[in-house]
Amino acid sequence: MLEGKVVVVTGAGRGIGRELALEIARQGASVVVNDLGAALDGQGQDQGPAAAVVEEIRRNGGSAVAHFGSVSDWGQAQNIVAAALDNFGRIDGLVNNAGILRDRFFFNMEPEEWRAVIDVHLHGSFYMARAAAQHFKQQQSGAYVHFVSTSGLIGNLAQANYSAAKMGIVALSKSIAMDMERYHVRSNCVSPFASSRMIGSIPTEGAEAGERVKRLQAMEPAKIAPLVAYLLTDSASDVSGQIFAVRANEVFLMSQIRPIRSMHADSGWTVQTIADRAMPAFRGSFYPLDRSQDVFSWDPV
């Protein structure tokens, strides 16, 4: 379903990104496999993972090239997109999957830990999307898929940097979808549940945390790939501005923020009338401090 298309996949050397690149290639696309080869915290560099994925795609009869640049650098992001043009003559899709973690409770988080995660996830998604935009506009077609997380959509402990970045990407994707609609370019988000290197950073002390990690480890990264590949196909030409989640064999369409209650006062509000009338009326509709596992409380199917 992607025959003749060219797709860039960032963070494609391991885990979910690797499975995305392999499935997209199986569907007939030529793939730019981008991966810096860094450790989970973003340190270091290793060309081996991306090169191995390219070799596997070629061994299976597909077409792919590797790129080892960092999405968090504006110039390198331009070069990643240029690799698609230089090697395959065009670009039809971009999957923003690259990411790192620097998990720490908010009250202990250092500015560098905040900045590093924002740079890769949020700035990197913008840099890559912006680099592709001029080509999408010129050819009047294109598809973005951005990876987000229920850590941002719902909430999680000790991930203020990651959660903020992922919610920023949600807003970025919606803005792209609106700004690029006139050029027949679409933009969607996918929130994955799957075993990956990032799962290894989750604290496992206590029975509850251990059970959660065990459930996550049972979810295969390959399960994420079909939805992402579909969103890149022409069959998804009317799907844009949406947020999806994939959890084993389950696919979810996630809600977006809309008003749920309203109160009106003819003479305007005071601090006291808000305390007396508005908050008591709203309180029954407040959202609790749920974490992702509180909302997705059943075993994956």
Image (cartoon, helix red, strand yellow):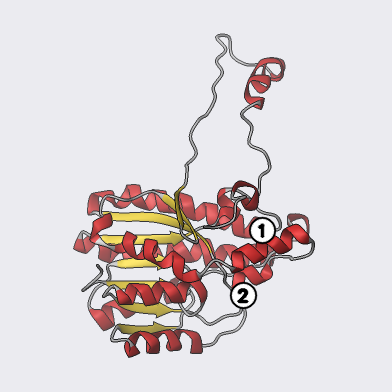
Residue name at image x 54 percent, y 87 percent: 46
Q: CA distance from mark 1 to mark 2?
A: 14 Å
Of the numbered discs 1 and 2, the one sitting upstream in the chain is 2
| Number of the label disc, if any, that sits on residue 40 | 2
- Name the residue rendered at 53%, 64% in the picture: 121
Q: Is residue 47 visible?
A: no
Taking the view exactly as shown, the residue that stands out farthest to the top is 267
Percent coordinates x, y for residue 5 in the rendering: 24, 71
Q: Name the foreground residue: 245 vs 51.
A: 245
Q: Is residue 109 left or right of residue 49?
A: right
| Secondary structure state at the residue bearing disc 1 | loop
Q: Which residue is mark 1?
A: 159
129 left or right of 114 in image? left
Q: Amino acid at mark 2?
A: Leu
Query: In x, y percent, where is residue 1?
Result: 24, 67
The x, y position of residue 296, in whole percent, is 59, 50
Look at the picture and state if 259 lies above or below 66: above
Q: Report whether residue 162 is seen.
A: yes
Mark 1: few/some/many CA within 10 Å (<14, 14-19, 20+): many
Which residue appears at 60% of the width and 75% of the height? Answer: 42
Residue type beneath disc 1: Gln
Element marked by disc 2: loop
Label 2 Cα neighbours within 10 Å, binned few <14 / some 14-19 / many ≥20:
some
Q: Which of the 4 image quadrants contains residue 63?
A: bottom left
Q: Look at 59% across and 14% down and name the residue there.
A: 268
* Pick the front one: 229 or 273: 229
